[in-house]
Amino acid sequence: MVEVSAERNSWVPATAGGADGPTIAESLGGRLGIVESGLPAIAYVTAYTATGQDATLSAAIALAIGVALAIARLARRQTVRYALSGLAGVALAAFIVSRTGRAEDFFLPGLLMNAGYALAYLISILVGWPLLGVFVGAITGQGMSWRDDPEQVRAYSRASWIWVAMFLLRLAVQLPLYLAGAVVALGVARVAMGAPLFAIAAWLSWLLLRPPPEPEPEPA
């Protein structure tokens, strides 16, 4: 989710980059992670168009791209966390397409994941355990200590609404395309609303969670 700084205000995401923490690109897994988030979908739509709408073959090509990206991380001795998570999604999508024969089903796991995350974030806000705080606490090692500070709880709740909105926006655009069987348009929307929309949500979260600037001392 969102990377965070380990400084005094360790609960504040450092997604905007700088000395305190990683950049937004790094929170997405670096440049290769951004490629991994969109390339299989691009390959699927491209192959689907070029092969005369052969969904099964297109899914196999997308899966091969996912495997190649995972191997590239291994060859560069980088973490495969991002690649393996993406590869699992592509593998599941390819399996579903091979069973149903419906080209739009390649995007079904992503739609279900967005719906699940939107619901999870919403419930977490309503019960007073905003999910963004849980993720940040786990990443920083802070645990659930932020729960003792009502100000942090409110801040995490406000920021978590951003992620609810992001996941719901993806569904609002992509679900009608899925139901209409508009595979090419769905692929374009999937890529356009993937890493770019995540980066915007991360930046907005950082704006909400960053501490206010310390007042400058009065001149003598």
Image: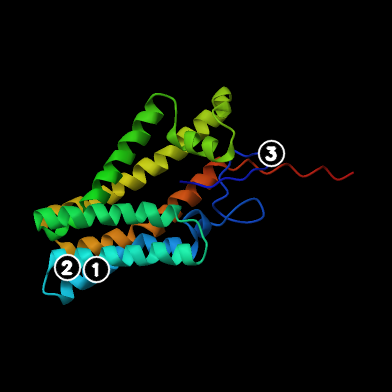
Q: Are marks 1 and 2 in contact (CB under 8 Å)?
A: yes
Quadrant where the image shows the C terminus: top right
What mark, if any, has residue 8 been given in the picture? Answer: 3
Residue at (30%, 45%) from the top-left corner? 114
Residue occupying image coordinates x 10% and y 57%: 102
Badge 2 marks a residue whose secondary structure is: helix
Tell me residue 32's x, y (percent). Answer: 45, 65
Q: Residue at x 63, y 56 (%)?
A: 18
Residue at disc 1, secondary structure = helix
- Name the residue type under label 1: Ile
Which amino acid type is marked by label 2? Leu
Comparing 208 with 28, the one in front is: 28
Label 2 sits on residue: 57
Q: Secondary structure at mark 3?
A: loop
Mark 3 residue type: Arg
Say whether residue 218 is visible: yes
Q: Earlier in the sequence, mark 2 or mark 3?
A: 3
The circle drawn on residue 61 is 1
Q: CA distance from mark 3 to mark 1?
A: 47 Å
> In front of the other: label 2 or label 3?
2
